[in-house]
Image (cartoon, coloured by chain):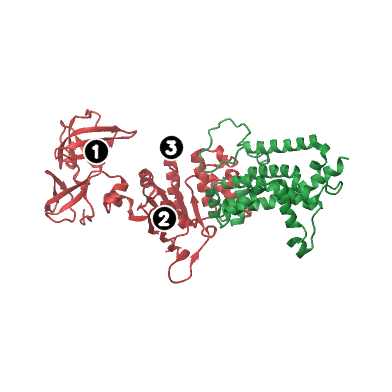
Chain colours: A red, B green
């Protein structure tokens, strides 16, 4: 298998915490996700050779970019020799060069630079703007020039630092699609830093959750969301509705939980009867029941009556805080267009169903065959 | 007679400007981009001619160039009372102006742009030549003009190290009938430097593009030699 493989294992003492990152990245898009200041950009800088870790090793296909440990000679390849494309958060286009000159920057003194640059700009749908200066381009256009420039020297690795954060939604979606296409076309190792979950879902094959310089969890993005490894990951992913419950019964079809007087049914997961466990349910997995309609099977379980405490509207979804009969509060969210026949005002009483499949225990691996 | 002092002044100023460019640029780069012990000391020393009376500068230059100095003793070069001494004195008093402006312009170039160039395969020298200097060119030029204008008008230190020998070291400021010409030259130099500074530092990456729809051809217009190239 000649697929590129990037191994990163670095340590760096920073002002507020110690960074210890371990990642192994194949030809895929790995999303580094976490709050700002968690060390995501530093990780990219270390890979690109713009930051020198205190210790560790960075290799691409066994070739060392960086190595420093007790034994053996230290290696620290300068950034220019690493063949890593880097798309900076601020685009970092050279303001004194045109789009084409920016793209051909790395191809200096190469005879075919012009054709290659033009081809890349065309590939990014920018051929008509090749003689514009960066300040004459829109954010999305600058972004695409930056990607084209990073790809000009045929890198094996492409690093992107929140490149789409300043763009509007439509532009983001186009660029996300473009990037996915490029990754498969060129078989690139792509590391993508973001703190937008939308970006993460749209782009990522795998997700690495980073917090205070530590990798909290790595895995396929869906899996990380279904099974966050810890409270910290839940917190970083912004999943509310975490609670403590007691396992009262285990049956082949699932678990019976007692949440301060509320009986809940959860899918089969490893647990022991009588134990207190931490469980959570994502706000999207709580459904509102119409009082006058027959129940469909997915929402038969876990019906709870609650009172709406507050209601928040967003452009494409809305969120309710509902206080339940056991005194706790949960967050419920759903698309804006849903439940329009119901009047969902603060103080109103509604019936909820906590979807059984959405009720997950923390730090519990799913039982096979689920 | 006006011509000898005028040509001599030009000669001195041209040489002083070349010294200013080379020495000033190296100092500005070091001060803007490098962390080294004694950085503050270097900065203070460079700025010293701004506050010292010309006679004190002249005194130091006499020590540095005159009898007993390494230059005279070891290399047997005696520059005192030649126009070279006038050029050196002029360069020394112009240096702080050049270094200040150039350093500010270089420090203003976004390090991210330089890093981007590094990831694109540039050596440090290429980064300097292709990114840093082009982006700081306005400030460097403004500093050079200010420094040269100051060098042109240098009188005190020059008098001490070069004397006032008509035809040999008598420059414009010393030929005292040249008041109007000097004032005019000084005014032009300052006005040009001010214009360059008003045109503003080159926009730094990371800032959003400025909300200036009308292209006034002013601050942000690319230099004419780039735009008018027949593409």
Q: Are marks 2 and 1 on the same chain?
A: yes
Residue designated by label 3: A168
* Residue A66 relative to residue A95: left or right: left
Residue B11 placement (x, y as % from top left): 80, 47
Whether residue B17 is visible, yes or no, is no
Question: Badge 3 sits on which subunit?
Answer: A
Query: Residue at left 66%, top 37%?
Result: B194
The answer to whether marks 3 and 2 sit on the same chain is yes
The residue under the point 46% across, 65% down is A67
- What is the number of callouts on the image? 3
Residue that mark 2 sits on:
A14
Chain of the residue under the numbered disc 2 shown in the image: A
Q: CA distance from mark 3 to mark 1?
A: 27 Å
Callout 3 environment at 10 Å: few (<14), some (14 to 19), or many (20+)?
few
Q: Position of residue A297 (x, y in %)?
A: 17, 41
Callouts 3 and 1 in the same chain: yes
Q: Secondary structure at mark 3?
A: loop
Circles 3 and 1 in contact, beta carbons < 8 Å: no
Given this view, does label 3 or label 2 mark the residue nearer the observer? 2
Q: Mark 2 vs mark 1: which is more N-terminal?
A: 2
Residue at figure coordinates x 67%, y 44% from the top left: B141
Indicate which disc, 3 or 2, sits on the residue closer to the N terminus.
2
Q: Chain of mark 1?
A: A
Looking at the picture, does residue B190 appear above or below residue A178? above
Q: Which quarter of the picture shows residue A366? A: bottom left
Foreground disc of the pair 2, 1? 2
Label 2 CA crowd tier, 10 Å (few <14, some 14–19, many 20+): few
Q: Which residue is mark 1?
A: A332
Q: Is residue B143 above or below residue B74?
A: above
- Give coordinates of residue B145: x percent, y percent: 70, 42
Give the spatial CA distance, label 3 vs label 2.
33 Å
First-in-chain label (3 vs 1): 3
């Amino acid at each position: 298998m000649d697929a590129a493989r990037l191994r990163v294992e670095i340590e760096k003492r920073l002002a507020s915490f110690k960074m210890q990152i371990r990642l192994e990245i194949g030809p895929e898009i790995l999303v580094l996700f976490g709050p700002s200041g968690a060390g995501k950009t530093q990780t990219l800088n270390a890979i690109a050779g713009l930051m020198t870790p205190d210790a560790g090793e960075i290799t691409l296909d066994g070739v060392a970019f960086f190595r420093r440990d007790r034994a053996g000679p230290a290696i620290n390849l300068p950034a220019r020799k690493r063949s890593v494309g880097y798309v900076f958060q601020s685009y970092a286009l050279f303001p004194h060069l045109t789009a084409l000159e920016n793209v051909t920057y790395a191809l200096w003194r190469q005879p075919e630079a012009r054709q290659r640059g033009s081809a890349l700009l065309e590939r990014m749908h920018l051929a008509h703007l090749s003689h514009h200066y960066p300040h004459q381009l829109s954010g999305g256009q600058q972004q695409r020039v930056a990607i084209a420039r990073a790809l000009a020297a045929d890198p094996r690795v492409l690093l992107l630092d929140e490149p789409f954060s300043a763009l509007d939604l439509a532009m983001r979606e186009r660029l996300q699609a473009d990037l996915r296409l490029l990754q498969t076309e060129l078989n690139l190792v792509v590391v993508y830093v973001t703190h937008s979950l939308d970006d993460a879902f749209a782009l990522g094959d795998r997700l690495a959750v980073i917090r205070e310089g530590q990798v909290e969890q790595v895995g396929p993005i869906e899996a990380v969301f279904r099974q966050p490894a810890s409270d910290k990951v839940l917190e970083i992913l912004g999943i509310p509705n975490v609670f403590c419950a007691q396992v009262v019964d285990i049956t082949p079809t699932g678990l019976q939980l007692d949440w301060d007087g509320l009986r809940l049914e959860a899918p089969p997961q490893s647990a022991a009867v009588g134990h207190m466990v931490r469980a959570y349910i994502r706000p999207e997995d709580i459904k509102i029941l119409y009082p006058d309609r027959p129940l469909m099977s997915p929402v038969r379980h876990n019906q709870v009556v609650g009172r709406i405490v507050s209601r928040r509207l967003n452009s494409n979804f809305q969120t309710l805080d509902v206080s339940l009969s056991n005194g706790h509060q949960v967050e419920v969210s759903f698309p804006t267009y849903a439940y329009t026949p119901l009047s969902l005002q603060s103080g109103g009483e509604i019936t909820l169903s906590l979807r059984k499949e959405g009720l997950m225990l923390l730090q519990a691996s799913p039982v096979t065959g689920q | 007679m006006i011509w000898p002092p005028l040509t001599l002044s030009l000669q001195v100023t041209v040489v002083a400007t070349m010294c200013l460019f080379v020495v000033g640029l190296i100092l500005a780069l070091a001060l803007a981009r490098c962390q080294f012990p004694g950085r503050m000391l270097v900065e203070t020393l460079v700025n010293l001619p701004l506050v010292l009376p010309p006679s004190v500068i002249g005194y130091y230059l006499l020590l540095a160039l005159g009898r007993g100095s390494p230059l005279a003793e070891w290399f047997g070069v005696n520059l005192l009372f030649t126009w070279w001494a006038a050029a050196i004195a002029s360069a020394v008093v112009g240096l702080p102006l050049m270094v200040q402006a150039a350093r500010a312009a270089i420090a203003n170039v976004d390090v991210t742009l330089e890093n981007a160039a590094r990831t694109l395969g540039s050596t440090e020298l290429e980064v300097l030549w292709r990114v840093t200097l082009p982006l700081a060119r306005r400030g460097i030029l403004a500093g050079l003009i200010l420094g040269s204008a100051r060098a042109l008008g240098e009188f005190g230190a020059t008098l001490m190290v070069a004397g006032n020998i008509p035809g040999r070291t008598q420059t414009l400021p010393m030929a005292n009938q040249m008041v109007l010409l000097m004032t005019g030259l000084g005014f032009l130099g300052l006005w040009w430097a001010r214009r360059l500074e008003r045109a503003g530092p080159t926009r730094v990456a990371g800032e959003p593009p400025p909300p200036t729809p009308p292209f006034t051809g002013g601050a942000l217009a690319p230099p004419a030699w780039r735009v008018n190239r027949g593409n």
